Amino acid sequence: MLIPQPTSYSTAPGHHELTAATAVHAPAEIAALLRELLSPVTGLPLPDAAAHAAELLFTLDTTETELGEEGYRLTVGDDGVRAVAGTLAGLRWAVQALRQLLPPAACGSTPPRAWPGWCRTPRSPTGPATPGAAC
């Protein structure tokens, strides 16, 4: 269960593993939040990378007005994690959702370097579902 509860989400087969090579492309404050919340539990540095090379891609797109002020789309698939929002607030909620999707093994006393992932496409409570969007 995600809090706040998404408007909708779907699951699909597959997984994604974060490794020591996993990199981030996001606005500076979102990249910092990803590192603050995920690095301690995964043990990963999550360095910056260009958009085409990043496994964690968090994009601010002000044309995504249908998502509202705090809405976001988050897709986790075999090729990585993709989040899009029209505002930084929406991207912050996407980070929080991703954090909640971490498998229990990622939060143990000895964080693993790589762990099995998930495949979900949650939508924020303020944004509508996107037809056909899935992992």
Image (spheres, grey):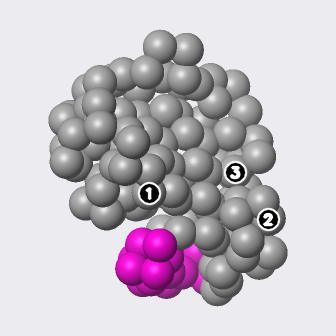
Residue at x 72% of width, y 76% of height: 49
Label 3, label 1: how far apart the Cα atoms are = 17 Å
Residue 16 is covered by the magenta coloring: no
Q: Which mark is residue 60?
A: 1
Locate the N terminus and report the quarter of the image it occupies.
top left
Is residue 125 depicted above or below 100 in this figure? above
The residue under label 3 is 80
Identify the main secondary structure in magenta: helix
Q: Earlier in the sequence, mark 2 or mark 1?
A: 2
- Which residue sits at x=21%, y=34%? 125
Quadrant showing the C terminus: top right
Mark 1 closeness class: few <14, some 14–19, many ≥20 residues within 10 Å: many
> Which stretch did the figure color magenta?
27-43
Could you tell me residue 119's position as x and y percent? 60, 36
Kindly indicate whether the residue at mark 1 contacts the one at mark 3 (C-beta within 8 angstroms).
no
Please state which of residues 58 and 35 is positioned toward the viewer in this rendering: 58
Q: Is residue 30 magenta?
A: yes
- Which disc is residue 53 wearing? 2
